[in-house]
Image: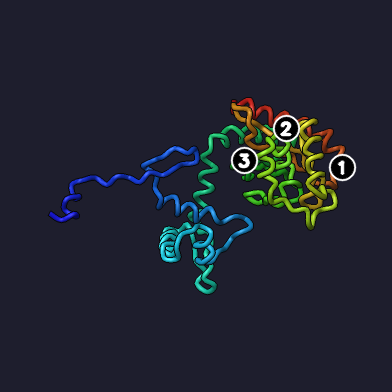
Amino acid sequence: MSAENRGAGKKARPQAKRGPDGAHNIYFSKIIDRGLNILDLFRPETTSLSLKEIAEATGINRTSSFRFVDTLVQLGYLRKDPRLKLIKLGPKALMLGQNIINSFDILQVVQPLIDGAFRKHNVTIDSAILDDVRFVRLYRREARDTLTFKLPQVLPAARVHCIALSKACLSVMDEEDLARATAEVSFKKRMPGAVANMAGLHRELELTRARGYSINNEEYVAGIISVGAPFFGADGKVLGAVSFDVVSIRLSKEDVEKRFAAAAVELARAITSSLG
């Protein structure tokens, strides 16, 4: 009897895979893992990649990378520029991301509370949640007759030091997470009001932690002043933040603090209480 026939009646043993917690999982799918790793390469600062770049970044050989990419293109999660041969996210990936955000339990808690605060204060309110140490925008209500100002879906890692939402979260992170969250911060091409170096950022975060809210004084974009406050999960760890955004032609920084800082803190506490 051949070796092939001798093994024909046996079930294949799944290959064990060591997960993030160090435990082995015999049901881990390497194929799904590699496909998701490819999708995870695309960020706000990396919107297109060549096949060679994908292979190098994932450690998958060129032939296998082509198969994964081609499959994802056919499924609509990626699209390929026929002229430049560059690969970008497809409409299916964007729909998937939006559906995941909309299905979050946290959104169901945050949305009605932001809607209530919006009706009360008639001011633009934004929110973001933490994905490890990345900041992903969650829900926004925009006031009428105001300067249109929308942050990208994932806040740029190089500029988290000048956005009220991210600064509110940074101020309550432990040292390890703070170091990772600010590892890509760049102080080049900064707005006049932004801090100039890491020491200045740490001083501002200390002030933010002491008063309970962050301030963005036209640091990310000219004409917008924001105050932000963090909200927390049942375990006491920061989950995200809310911010109240006001155009500077209406109110000064001091006026924004007087009118909206307490409201931002109150909204963040309400979210924390509801999540708890």
The residue singled out by tag 1 in the image is: 252
Q: Residues within 10 Å of mark 1 (few under 14, many from 20)?
A: some
- The numbered mark, 3 or 2, whose residue comes first in the sequence reads 2
Q: Using the image as rendered, state which of residue 176 and residue 236 is in the foreground.
A: 176
Q: Which residue is mark 3?
A: 130
Q: Amino acid at mark 1?
A: Ser
Q: Amino acid at mark 2?
A: Lys
Q: Residues within 10 Å of mark 3 (few under 14, many from 20)?
A: some
In the displayed structure, 69 sits above or below 84; it is above
Horizontal and vertical percent for residue 134? Answer: 63, 45
Q: Position of residue 256 (x, y in %)?
A: 82, 38
Residue appearing at x 50%, y 72% in the figure: 82
Left or right of residue 158, residue 50 in this image: left
For the N terminus, the quadrant is: bottom left
For the C terminus, the quadrant is: top right
Residue that badge 2 annotates: 120
